[in-house]
Image (spheres, rainbow, N blue to C red):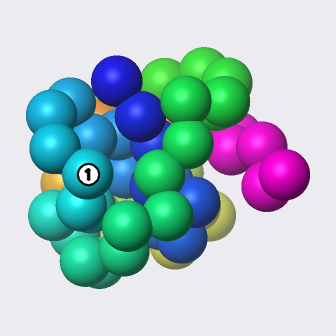
Amino acid sequence: MKACRNCKYIVVSGDTCPVCGSKQLTEKFFGMVYIFDTESSLAKVLGITVKGPYALRVKVR
Ligand SMILES: [Zn+2]
């Protein structure tokens, strides 16, 4: 399981983020949250527009 460095989406299989199309995935991420409602305050804080599983924090390098 990897997280997208660009949008924090958690990618279960494959090497490309299905949300933003980025190939910048990392296994170094912390926490996990499932966004059901993209209108929620949490989704807005995280900048999420597509529902799904997201990492709370992604290690940039
Ligand atoms: Zn992404």
User: Could you say which quadrant of the image residue 46 lies in?
Assistant: bottom right
Q: Position of residue 2 (x, y in %)?
A: 41, 34
Q: Residue at x 35, y 40 (%)?
A: 10
Query: Disc 1 residue type?
Result: Asp
With 45 as the anchor, is 20 left or right in this view?
Answer: left
Nearer to the camera, 22 or 44: 22
Q: Is residue 39 magenta?
A: no
Q: Is residue 58 above or below residue 2?
A: below
Q: Position of residue 23 (x, y in %)?
A: 37, 67
User: Could you say which quadrant of the image residue 28 lies in?
Assistant: top right
Q: Main secondary structure of the magenta part?
A: loop
Where, quadrant-wise, is the N terminus in this rendering? top left
Whether residue 5 is visible to the viewer of this picture, yes or no, is yes
Q: Position of residue 56 (x, y in %)?
A: 62, 38
Q: What kind of element bears circle 1?
A: loop
Span colored in magenta? 57-61
Residue wearing tag 1:
15
Q: Is residue 10 above or below residue 47?
A: above
With 21 as the anchor, is 47 left or right in this view?
Answer: right
Q: Position of residue 20 (x, y in %)?
A: 29, 78
With 52 as the anchor, is 35 left or right in this view?
Answer: right
Q: Residue at x 64, y 31 (%)?
A: 29
